[in-house]
Image: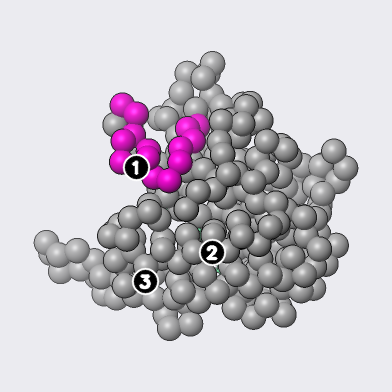
């Protein structure tokens, strides 16, 4: 494989930063990061070298970062904030800041990234989204009345219809736990949420999602595929997922 130059957006995020680090350490790639905050990048990586700063709501701020890249990894997301600590016995309430709603960040912002990448001649986009998008009433859609999973799914549809090579990874609940020690499990359109095998939690370490992103940039069998991704609880050594080509081969193109 010739060296692939990749831009990772959301590179100061919890999963994006792991993808950035993994690509930086892999000699098959040259990586650039896109983020909002130079201070955060400096704090996380000890340097802002290979970083570009801007806002995905402003497509022009992406143009320079995408120059010379063959692939784009989209790891941006809106994030709700708790309005106030919950009263005893009550559920916490959330809201989005007015310029950080899912419609602006997860739909318009992702659309901006896709359009700018295509205009820059990018060949492939790997997009990390979320399981749950088939259910309008999913609790995440109710949060801050943001309909976040609905907007994420609309952006996925835009990506698929754009005609560029895509891989859409819809993760289960993200865990800050070690990667590379579990068997991964792929599904389609929330079937695993409705019916998880052996009632295992529909979750996955961020590090395993990040590794799946890196493998999707390497394996032809990940091209034009969309899948849900979760993990079995920590596995016996012989069932840990290692063959990603075979894993991706189990999946199909996106169906909406
Ligand atoms: P995260 O830490 O919240 O990172 C999101 C990134 O997006 C941050 O780096 C943030 O920048 C960036 N961002 C937000 N608005 C932006 C804007 N306008 N311009 C440029 N950058 C912007 O993400 P995560 O928790 O690792 O999640 C990764 C993905 O998995 C997300 O799509 C998430 O929805 C999805 N997911 C999450 C869960 C879960 O359990 N949390 C479950 C399934 C799927 P800053 O660093 O400056 O804040």
Residue 146 badge: 3
State how the image is colored.
Answer: one colour
Query: Does residue 67 appear in this view?
Result: yes
Q: Residue at x 42, y 30 (%)?
A: 232
* Separation of marks 1 and 2 at Cα, in angstroms: 21 Å
Q: Nearer the viewer, residue 152 or 161?
A: 161
Query: Does residue 45 appear in this view?
Result: no
| Residue 231 image position (x, y, % from top left) | 45, 34
Q: Is residue 62 left or right of residue 251?
A: right
Residue 7 vertical placement versus 82 (above, below): above
Looking at the rendered structure, the secondary structure element under dot 2 is helix
Q: Residue at x 45, y 66 (%)?
A: 151
Looking at the rendered structure, the secondary structure element under dot 1 is helix
Q: Is residue 96 left or right of residue 125?
A: left
Residue farthest right in this picture: 2
Residue 210 badge: none
Q: Is residue 138 left or right of residue 57?
A: left
The residue carrying mark 1 is 193
- Which range is magenta? 184-198
| Residue 176 image position (x, y, % from top left) | 46, 46
Quadrant for residue 31, please give it. Answer: bottom right
- Asked whether mark 3 and ligand 1 are closer than 8 Å, the reply comes as no
């Amino acid at each position: 494989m010739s060296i692939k130059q990749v831009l990772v957006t959301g590179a100061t995020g919890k999963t994006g930063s792991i993808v950035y680090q993994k690509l930086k350490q892999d000699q098959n790639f040259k990586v650039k990061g896109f983020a909002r905050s130079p201070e955060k990048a400096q704090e996380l990586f000890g340097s802002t070298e290979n970083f570009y700063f801007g806002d995905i709501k402003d497509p022009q701020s992406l143009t320079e970062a995408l120059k010379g890249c063959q692939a784009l990894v989209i790891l941006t997301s809106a994030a709700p904030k708790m309005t106030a600590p919950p009263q005893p016995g009550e559920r916490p309430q959330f809201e989005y800041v007015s310029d950080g709603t899912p419609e602006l960040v997860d739909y318009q912002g992702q659309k901006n990234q896709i359009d700018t990448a295509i205009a820059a001649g990018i060949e492939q986009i790997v997009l990390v989204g979320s399981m749950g998008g088939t259910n309008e009433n999913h609790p995440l859609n109710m949060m801050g009345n943001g309909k976040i999973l609905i907007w994420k799914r609309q952006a996925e549809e835009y990506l698929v219809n754009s005609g560029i090579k895509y891989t859409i990874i819809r993760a289960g609940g993200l865990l800050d736990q070690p990667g590379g020690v579990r068997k991964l499990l792929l599904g389609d359109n929330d079937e695993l949420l409705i019916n998880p095998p052996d009632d295992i939690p529909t979750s996955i370490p961020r590090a395993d999602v990040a590794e799946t992103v890196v493998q999707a940039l390497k394996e032809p069998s990940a091209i034009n595929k969309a899948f849900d991704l979760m993990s079995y609880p920590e596995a016996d050594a012989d069932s840990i997922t290692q063959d990603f080509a075979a894993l991706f081969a189990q999946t199909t193109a996106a169906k909406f």
